[in-house]
Amino acid sequence: MILGKFDPQKKQRFAILDEKGKIIAPEYEPKIDEKTLLKMYRTMKLARIADIRALQYQRQGRMLTFAPVQGQEAAQIGTMAALDKNDWISPAFREHAAMLYHNVPLENIYLYWFGNERGSRVPDDVNVLPVNIPIGSQYGHASGLAYASKVLKNNKQIAVTYIGDGGTSHGEFYEGLNFAATYDSPMIGIIQNNQWAISTPRRKATKAETLAQKAVAVGVPGIQVDGNDVLAMYAVVKEAAERARKGEGPTLIEAFTYRLGPHTTSDDPTIYRKNEEVEEWKKKDPLIRFKVYMESKGLWDDAKEAKLDEELEAYVKTTFEKVEKEGPIVTIDEVFDHTFATLTDELKEQKEYLKQIAKETAGK
Ligand SMILES: Cc1ncc(C[n+]2csc(CCOP(=O)(O)OP(=O)(O)O)c2C)c(N)n1
Ligand SMILES: [Mg+2]
């Protein structure tokens, strides 16, 4: 048992690996089979490479906006590896690593950030909601999915949702979590505390000692975890998932991590944060720590790393070139098609308005 042993109100952060990747809490080391460990490492690398390349494509003027995930891969992969294929993700906007692990094709992710609505149309057997920009509302969606699972599936399908540190000050975060708590719905809330909400530092956004302690207000277990430790994230989520499937309700997990890149490609973080801070966090890079662990298990070495890098680089390049060929928005209809089964009057009006403008400006 991990939950309950680490007091969320006292900054008792749970970790299994130290900052160099060495096991410091062997009693909690999860038993993960080789195949899963390799998938976890591979997906972390794919997310990292896809991220670095997306930033470069954007700087070359070949991509629209992009919100990099660099630094937060363990918080996301550790979560998803501990869940089942049929569980749901209700993401915010920085969850590419989680989405990739949960079988969203990279092509969809790139299409979305390229401004092509088709990116949000994932394969039918992939239980991932579209990217959610309005902060906090993804918690409401997740608690709805979790409630449906309780009613229809006896809690067997979990809904996991993510939010940033800044997002936990939004009303919908509490509302979603409280709704799930009162109905004991199978939901897991992950707070990715990456220390910044664009240029607002974590300490200015809330007086709360930890973000995990926000669980106390709604009466569910909460825990702060080293979010750059993929094993710790996995172990805690496994336990939260067991509770959820037994009908014991949601868990709130604060992943203590860091956004190594800019907020989005429109942001310049050098204006508001010190380079030394970034350099300190680079030393705690989740990929390096996991690699050390994989090597200690005899599952990884530099030759395998070089081969994987080459394979993933080629895959990322081919995928991007395909997306680039398809281009941004295809039709105005597609912007609206996947919002509601029946469009609201307001959306109908907006759609007609946009079509009118398109007609008027055609050929100009
Ligand atoms: C309701 C709402 N208000 C404001 C914004 C603009 N906005 C986009 S991201 C962001 C900061 C989010 O910070 P955090 O929750 O810490 O997540 P992070 O970006 O660090 O992953 C803001 C204010 C928004 N998308 N939605
Ligand atoms: Mg943040």
Image: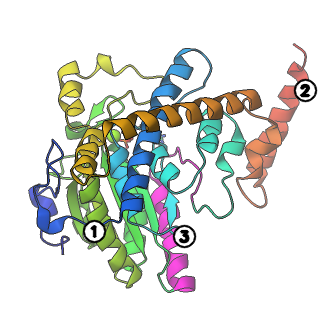
Q: Quadrant of residue 202?
A: top left
Q: Quadrant of residue 80?
A: bottom left
- Find ligand 1 in the image and state its quadrant: top left
**In front here: 59 or 47?**
47
Determine which residue is flagged by label 1.
Answer: 31
What amino acid is at disc 2? Lys
Magenta-tinted stretch = 128-153
Q: Is residue 68 visible?
A: no
Q: Position of residue 106 (x, y in %)?
A: 58, 42
Residue at the spot 64% in from the left edge and 41% down from the top edge: 107
- The mark that comes first in sequence, 1 or 2, is 1
Eye-nearest disc, 3 or 1: 1
Q: Position of residue 112 (x, y in %)?
A: 63, 39
Q: Position of residue 47 (x, y in %)?
A: 46, 40
**In front here: 155 or 176?**
155
Determine which residue is flagged by label 2.
Answer: 359
Q: CA distance from mark 1 to mark 2?
A: 60 Å
Q: Is residue 121 visible?
A: yes
34 relative to 90 in the view: left or right: left
The secondary structure type at the circle numbered 2 is helix
In the picture, the quarter occupied by the N terminus is bottom left
**In front here: 174 or 49?**
49
Determine which residue is flagged by label 3.
Answer: 86
